[in-house]
Amino acid sequence: KIIFDLAIKGAYKILEKAWERYERAIKNFGKEVNVGFPNTAYYLPIIYAILGYPVKKLGDCEEVLQEAKKLLPDLSSSKNGLLYLGLALDAGMATLFAEEVVEAIRYLEEPNLYTKTEEPTEDNIWLGAADDVIFRKRGVEFVDGSSPGFAVLLGSPPDKETAKNIVQDLLEKGLYVFMHDQTNGVYMPYLLREAGLQLGWPVRLVPFGPHYTSIVFAIGFACRVAMSFGGVKPGDYINNLLFNKYKTFAFVITFGPPTEEWVANGLGALNWGIPIICDWAVPEIKIPGICIYEALISKPTHCYFQVIMENQEFYRSSVPEIASQELIEKALEVRGLKITKTKLNIPVSYAPAFEGERVRKEDLYLECGGGRTSALELLISSSFEEVKDGEIRVIGPEISDLPKIDKKGPPYRLPLAIVIKVAGTNMQEDFEPIMERQIHYFINYAQGIMHIGQRNIVWIRISKQAVEKGFLLKHIGEILYNRIKQEFSSIVDKCEVEIFTDEEMVKKLIEKAKSIYEKRDARLAGMVDENVEEFYSCTLCQSFAPTHVCVITPERGGPCGAYSWLDGKAYYQINPAGPNQPILKGEIIDLKLGQFKGVNEFVKKASKGKVERVSLYSIMNDPMTVCGCMEAIAAISAPVNGIIIVNREFDKETPIGLKFSTLAGMIGGGQVTPGFLGISKQYIISKKFISAEDGFLRIVWMPKILKEELKEKLQKRAEELGVPDFLEKIADESVVNTEEELFNWVKKVNHPVLKLPPLT
Ligand code: SF4
Ligand code: NI
Ligand code: NI
């Protein structure tokens, strides 16, 4: 109970401070000034998620603070047991509301406190709230399983060795590490930087802010995941709390004596089922170490945030002071995370967290490809006789030979060819490119090894640190062999890896590989929807958008850009009970719209009755739903009779007055929204791009970066349609920013859309 007293006291203090800051800000800026976190459609996300209240202006904060005040219990009220926990949780919630207001005011008062970038800059380590671009990119990893969740660290261990060990441990488990506040003047991210670690979203080490109030960036992130990927509506606090409790794996670890404020924040986090693990005794209670597990209340009646406590157990157990390493185990145990670690016989750490890490020039030991030397990677299927299972060979100089060959290095350079041969009864040639694409992830997960590109434009860098630990080229073979056998066990029976570093041989192999790549591309390009009997479903995103189903055809891949028809086919072979199932087209209902009886039946069942019909090629009639992880969004502009496209990376408003993030919020979560379509970038240049409504020629606007990215392919498609100057007729943000301007633009350039029938 003492812990609850602390929490409630802390909450009072924090709320009081928030009021002070609010009043000061009102004096300086007035009630009408805009407030919010940068580039987000979720306003102040915790307040928006829980109360459904969009804070837009400074004056809006007053209502929130009033609401927070109501949540604070009377200190003299009944202090008995479980009810009291409810009060403390409410106080925790009030704390987070107040802190979000405080952080919003900080953005106003100190606009340069946070970098607002993905990675720290040289002179600023604190990143602040994740904008929607970062959020989408990273949040989706909690959906697709590449990260189980996050650890919120409050304060810091005293020395850099401990700090490094702790985060290394967390990263190996795939978790994101969020860092806040300090302990005795020590800030964790500075220690990590000193220890030579790279920081930022790409490497999953996120220094959010120097104050404890920055914890709202972490909890707000979780709230947005529920709203964006889980289809939880703003204000639906019950489902937001439950969603995170069951789907996002998260916990708080505090370092050093927990203050009242920390405890109040901890109780706030507990509302989402996020437990707190302290490494320190709380002084007032003189129990060495506290550990709040999950909350239990059987049936509370008056508590605002009661739902989260149903059917749960509450413990407050005293445990002997926990050593840092044990802390994490404790946290994992409390939260019930089972880590299936990939066992590899290599001398460096191996985890998804190391995918985003770079090997910088100063750290470089060996470099292959990337225009410096010739290099390639190739995966081919062979007959059983030709493949010796488990054989890993390095042909040419190994890393250990380098100092003998070249006295100048490091950095050293070598040509490199990685050739993987697989055999299996279920193996098909079609699966080769799909498996080959995984090489990137397989290799990149190794700490100190960087992998960029594919095929004969691959680029690999190996760091000095990795080599010091004993990393050799043969370990690349070790990684590839094991991961392939593991991930593709149902199609690969035998696998062999050869790594060539001999110049002559690599050159020869490149010639051979080029003709294989060409053959593959030609095959892919020739595939059309009409020539296949079946499409494939993808329901991978149902874990977050339970009624969403993607239908993947040869000419329309998944909106996330990660799944093509061939992928669907291969993954069905690999896992016949998995999220990719064949869909027999069946009877044609409407060829132009792309409606098929078999597809409708499948989608109806897989969407649990929510979606009855799908047109594969239409934006107006029964368009396909989308979960939240699309690469781009197509939307109609009614006055212009055209289609605009905006990609995720573009963070400004489109001419229809909405940003990508706002649009995403409107159409995500598996709803049917005529006039809007979540799409992959690749789909834009498909012959089936919204073909029911002459989609391609209706494109009137897209951001410059997207136009640049797809330039050649767009041009080719425009020529096919007999409008070679079409690209110049597509407006971008440099010429058009409103619908009115767009209207004038299409007239001015005599855009083909003028001759198209009205969209209905
Ligand atoms: Fe999600 Fe669809 Fe991509 Fe599958 S294809 S991962 S369901 S967006
Ligand atoms: Ni790596
Ligand atoms: Ni998705």
Image (spheres, rainbow, N blue to C red):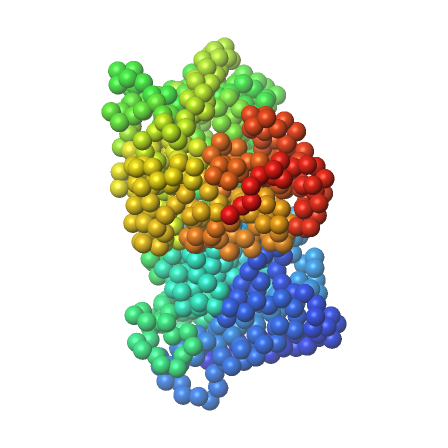
Residue 241 at x, y = what percent? 42, 65
Horizontal arrangement in the rendering, residue 336 relative to residue 679 (left or right)? left
Residue 128 point in image, percent of width and height: 60, 57
Q: Examine the rendering and report whether any part of residue 567 can be seen.
A: yes
Visible residue check, residue 446: no
Relative placement, left or right, of 624 versus 758 is left
Q: Residue at x 30, y 45 (%)?
A: 601
The quarter of the displayed image where residue 634 is located: top right
Outermost residue toward the left in this view: 425
Is 85 above or below relative to 719?
below
Count the marks.
0
Taking the spot 41% from the left edge, 60% from the top edge, the residue there is 244
Residue, x 48% and y 61% (percent of image)? 223
Residue 28 drawn at (x, y percent): 75, 72
Question: Which residue is depicted at the point 57% across and 69% down?
Answer: 99
Q: Nearer the viewer, residue 556 or 487?
A: 556
**Quadrant showing the N terminus:** bottom left
Question: Please, which residue is most extreme toward the right here?
Answer: 28
Image quadrant in which you'd find residue 59: bottom right
489 versus 234 height, above or below: above
Position of 255 relative to 760 (above/below)? below
User: Nearest the camera: 185 or 268?
Assistant: 268
